[in-house]
Image (spheres, rainbow, N blue to C red):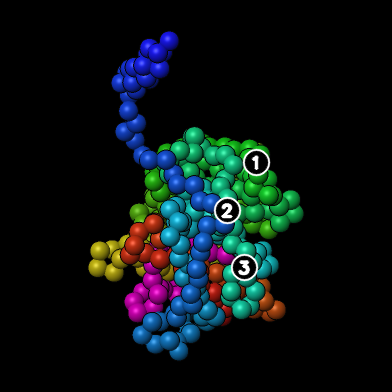
Amino acid sequence: MKMAPMRILLSVLLLLFLLPSWSGEERLPVLHADAPVTARRVALNPTDPNQVELGGLTYLGGLEFRSSAPGFGGFSAMAVLGDRFTLLSDSGTLMTFRMDASMAPQGIRFSALPDGPGTGWSKLDRDSESLTRDPATGSWWVGFERANAIWRYSPDFTRATGHVAPPAMADWPSGSGPETMVRLRDGRFLVIAEGEEGARKGTKEGLDFTTDPVRAPRRGFVFSYRPPRGYRPVDIAELPDGRLAILNRRFALRTLFTAALTIVPRAAIRPGAIVRGREIARFTAPILHDNFEAIAVTREGKDTILWIASDDNQQFWERSLLLKFRLDV
């Protein structure tokens, strides 16, 4: 009888010896729902705290979020509905909170996408880069790089309701796919690749889906978007007047991350078109410049408000910023 525990131990050790060890990515850290977060105000220009004008924008305030919790950050997409903010990280984590004109976040909570490509073990599975919503049904759509797929979720993000890997996106580079996506008010969806070259050199391939791409992934057409030289599109939002605001990002060793904001007329999106936006603002030193990847639009009275957020890549030298602007053009 005394030998039984020893036999069990030897069996376990033998099993561990025979099974191959895990040598891939470590499992994604899981944030607790109430992980601690701090937010501090930031100036648009740290060298001139009084500067508020930036091209066609007026700065209304901004925050830097910080947390010691593993897995915090990486915000690549965003939606703002009234005073409710939803930020989506590139590892499938959702950060939600409410914030009024005082810009003091209340009730910050974290959750995870309930499903998606792969097992969800690693960032390769949950490289969620774009987010859009249908205001009528409340459904959400998330674009995943690497998988080049679009998943649809219930209004409360508790379950996936469908997904698709559109044939037109099959050959997009795995690390720079559907980073830019928006559902327009007329029900169409626009998706622009970060890396796939369009019809001409210097352009990026775009897709205009006639309706929900999960239901009809073959209905629509191809166009090309020409970002500012050296930049890549990373997010898009529809303005109240139907124009499109496109956030573009650039990385260079000398300047690190910079961003440019362009405005595109809705009518410019046509089959086979080469679309060029009008640049209205550029985020370069001494202006706050970081890995800006998310944009959202709201209204305050007659004013159109743009929200821009950054992905810190969970690196010490990058930041999780949320900036608020009034659109003046």
First of labels 1, 2 by sequence position: 2
- Looking at the picture, which amino acid does disc 1 mark? Arg
Instruction: Tell me whether circle 3 and circle 1 mark residues in contact (CB < 8 Å).
Output: no
Residue beneath disc 1: 159
Which span of residues is magenta-colored?
A: 277-296
First of labels 3, 1 by sequence position: 3
* Image position of 266 (left or right of 41): right
* Image position of 118 (left or right of 285): right
Instruction: Give coordinates of residue 290: x percent, y percent.
Output: 39, 67
Q: Residues within 10 Å of mark 3 (few under 14, many from 20)?
A: few
Residue 280 counted in the magenta span: yes
Instruction: Tell me whether circle 1 and circle 2 mark residues in contact (CB < 8 Å).
Output: no
Residue 299 against residue 197 in the figure, above or below: below
Residue beneath disc 3: 106
Instruction: Give coordinates of residue 285: x percent, y percent.
Output: 34, 77
Instruction: Give coordinates of residue 138: x percent, y percent.
Output: 71, 52
Mark 3–mark 1 distance (CA, rounded to whole Å): 25 Å
Which residue is at a point 51% across and 64% down the rendered structure image? 37
Instruction: Give coordinates of residue 59: x percent, y percent.
Output: 51, 80
Label of residue 33 in the image = 2
In this orientation, which residue lies closer to the viewer: 25 or 276? 25
Q: Residue furthest left?
A: 254
Q: Specify the quadrant that holds the N terminus.
A: top left
